[in-house]
Image: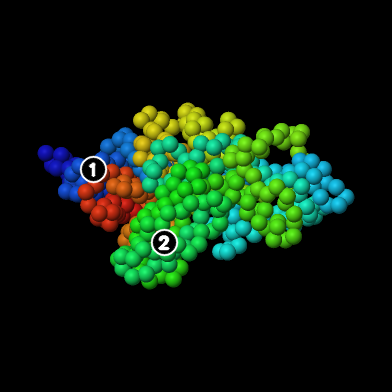
Amino acid sequence: MFKIRLRIYIIIVSFLFNPSAHSQNRVQESIGNLVSNPSNKNAKISFKAIDLATGKEVASYNSSLAIPSASTTKLFSTATAFQVLGSNFVTSTRIYYKGKIGKDSVLYGDIYIRGGGDVSLGSRFFCEKGKELAFLDRWTDSLKSKGISKIQGSVICDGSEFGYAGTPKSWNWDDIGNYYGTAAEGINFFDNTIKIYFKTKGLGKKSELLEIYPKISNFSFKNEVVSGKVSGDNVIVFGANYSLNRYAQGFLPTNQERFEVKGSMPDPEYQLAEEWVKVLRARSFVVRDGAKGMRSDKTSAKVNYASDVKYLFLEKSKTVKEIAYWANFKSVNLFAEGLLNYIGFSQKNDGSTKASLIALEKFWTDKINFEGLVLKDGCGLSKENAISATHFCDLLKYLYASKNYSDFKSTLPIAGVSGTIKNLCKGQAGEGRIFAKSGTISKVKSYAGYVLSKSGKNLAFAITVNNFSGSNSQVITEIEKVLNELANY
């Protein structure tokens, strides 16, 4: 009897003084508290955390439940880009000419801009503000150096290699007219956005439309924006793929002289050709037949780039690592979709969303169990995506053991420090210890990534909450308690 009591005593003491065992229960307890919170009575929750050294589960709840996870979906597109393409992969936009260059510096033919899916061209994330289109001056200088000062034809932009499907079909109508809902295509520039400037007046008064930049030919814009009791941009821009009609509804702060709202650019392919023609003409170049887009201008016959044209120069994109950084750090949808397109194009010579998702799944077929996983895009804007905490942990575990781990992890924001989670766990145990992607759409909140615990353990975790009845801030507070326990593990 004494030996039995002694053994029980030793077990109890070992548990009390074993931080790992104690913390493990605390992690499970914290997720239990989140689940039992009255605001989550009707919520769907998927959670899992694993020890990356052993692969063992730390804690879980409905870990196989696949549900919409918003922008944490970007982990799949960025991770796959690292694995398939490599950190230093670049694409390019290539410039050609068709015809002959005369001794009089006249090109008797056309200039072709051939897109390669570069989403970093003229992006605000890689350019000094106000100099996003400076590359067009470089292109003009290059054209001049090739002995061309007059074009007896057109500047034709061609993004046809990636198709013209537009945004993924499952995206909401009230997203695709906004800057975050723009499509990634064969030709992308200026983040595929337009800047819309308003002047606002007193409360309840209709705003005045000042300017749209870049200026778009034959563009129709209906302004239904009024001044309201708001502190920022509460405007939704509506418009279909490739449509030259847009209208805006919503509210802006009162008495603003020049308030900027961003929307999606209707047709980047044609617009890039037009912007370059503007620069060329401003620098005394003659372009007789102006700008054309391969999709919009039926007279622009497709060319055989191996035989019909001659190469002039190219513009390289930023690397996968650089683009993935902003895709995860600031949750840039265009960049995540662009990386997904690169994957499809590199594997199947088809940069459409559909083909790219097939290529992504094929890569992971023998590496991760995709049962129950549904991907409809690369950025998480689609509410038809369905990903479980187990799917995320399996992905994160695989990356942890890969040569791309350091580069991939470097794209993730740090809790309480940077990016989209700079306010998460601020001043708490998780600050500086959680490296994760966040996700937020209506009634969806999620986080997935890595934790370096106080005991030195490397963990992977994912948590997604759908259909909660409280506010975003309330559910974040509950999630923080779980994350802090992981940090203490």
Between residues 461 and 270, which one lies in front from this camera angle? 270
CA–CA distance in space, label 2 to label 1: 29 Å
Name the amino acid type tagged 2: Val
Q: Is residue 292 left or right of residue 422?
A: right
Q: Return the x and y of residue 178 as percentages of the image width and height.
A: 44, 51
* Location of residue 207 with respect to 332 vertically, above or below: below
State which quadrant residue 388 falls in: top left
* Residue at position x 33%, y 35% in the image: 66
Q: Which residue is mark 1?
A: 43
Query: Relative to the observer, which residue lies in front, 225 or 5?
Result: 225
- Amino acid, disc 1: Ala
Residue at screen point 83% across, 52% down: 105
Residue lying at the far left of the rendered structure = 1
Residue assigned mark 2: 417
Q: Look at the image and tell me whether residue 275 can be seen.
A: yes
Observer-nearest residue: 478 or 108? 108
Looking at the image, which residue is at 39% across and 43% down?
173
Q: Position of residue 310 (x, y in %)?
A: 77, 41
Q: Is residue 51 visible?
A: no
Question: Which quadrant of the rendered structure holds the N terminus?
Answer: top left
Tell me the mark number nearer the camera, choosing from 2 and 1: 1
Q: Residue at x 79, y 54 (%)?
A: 149
Residue 451 horizontal/vertical position (percent): 39, 50
